[in-house]
Amino acid sequence: MAPEPTEVISGGAAGPAPALGSGDSGSGPVPAPPAGPEVRVRFEQLIAEELNGLYRSALRLTRNPTAAEDLVQEVMLKAWRSFHTFQEGTSIRAWLHRILMNAFFDSYRKQAREPEVLDQQDVGEFYLYDKAQEGESLGEAGNPEVEVLDRIMDADVRHSLDALPVQYRAAVLLSDVQGFTYKEIAEMLGVPVGTVMSRLFRGRHLLQRQLWESATKRHLLKGDGR
Amino acid sequence: MNCEESMEMLWQFLDKELDGGATGELQRHLEECRHCFSKAEFEQRLRAMVRRSCSCEQAPPELRERLSKLIRLF
Ligand SMILES: [Zn+2]
């Protein structure tokens, strides 16, 4: 599938996203929140389960621990206020991430920065793999491509992901880290599935290029560095 | 399915977003073609690595406490 040639970032999740989890909720209209202690206990339980995952996503989006905390706080309060609209039996993680993406891109748009014009340089289909195969010097025996992966540090991965333009970063984060489906991501970002795919695939290309660069920069790999 | 076609669909395959027919065809190609199999394996490992690398940070305990307090207020 062909990636979009150029994309100018004007913010992501536009407008109210459609309700998530159209499938199997089945329990009719949602009653107004009693907001009694038992509801709060349940919500607090959810927070305990979901907080780390949500915080990690916020950290990748904002790239700043303080901003990530603020964002998570905003999201959790929004979630608490609209908890009565959450449909039992659907994914709470997807629901929270939809609120997260909306909140993040809302404030991202308000910051009225220069639109981020995305890199148009083409990258190979499987950049890292191809690079690893080229750099045969590094593997005397066996699998150069496996060695490449062994030498990349966790911090390299996070830094490389953080270096991507925000729309690509969001797509890769939601798919590769959080494991959401294309359809779920499309709902979270308020874009068609085809757009999700092109951002995701391009984001992966860029991530691989970034990984290769950061790994060679640290002299962990004998790439040609060019 | 040839190599080019199978590699075009590789990411959708790994994302479990291909329909049954295409999945079967791609799987058959991967069984027969060492080259594509090796790429597929690489992409899968890379993905596991991305997920693992981004799954170790913990929310600060203060955030958790602050949230509990705020929820009681609102
Ligand atoms: Zn092949």
Image: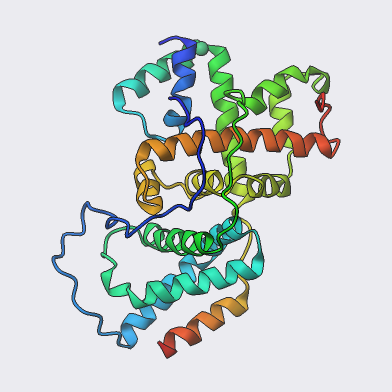
Q: Residue B43: where, in percent of width, then height?
A: 57, 30
Q: Residue A216: where, in percent of width, then height?
A: 80, 34
A153 versus B14 height, above or below: below
Question: Would residue A132 be found to the left or right of residue A185 on screen?
Answer: right
A118 versus A39 height, above or below: above
Q: Residue A70: where, in percent of width, then height?
A: 56, 72
Q: Residue A209: where, in percent of width, then height?
A: 67, 33
Residue A172 in sight in this render: yes
Residue drawn at (62%, 44%) of the image = A164
Q: How many marks?
A: 0
Q: Quadrant of residue A151?
A: top right
Residue drawn at (64%, 26%) of the image = A127
Residue drawn at (52%, 69%) of the image = A72
Question: Would residue A71 be found to the left or right of residue B21 on screen?
Answer: right
Q: Quadrant of residue B2?
A: top left
Residue A143 in sight in this render: no
Query: Quadrant of the image for the C terminus of chain A?
Result: top right
Question: Would residue A9 be found to the left or right of residue A186 on screen?
Answer: right
Residue drawn at (42%, 29%) of the image = B13
Q: Going by the picture, which residue comes out furthest to the left?
A: A28
B17 versus A117 height, above or below: above
Name the one closer to the observer, A205 or A41: A205
Query: Quadrant of the image for the N terminus of chain A?
Result: top left
Q: Going by the picture, which residue comes out furthest to the right?
A: A219
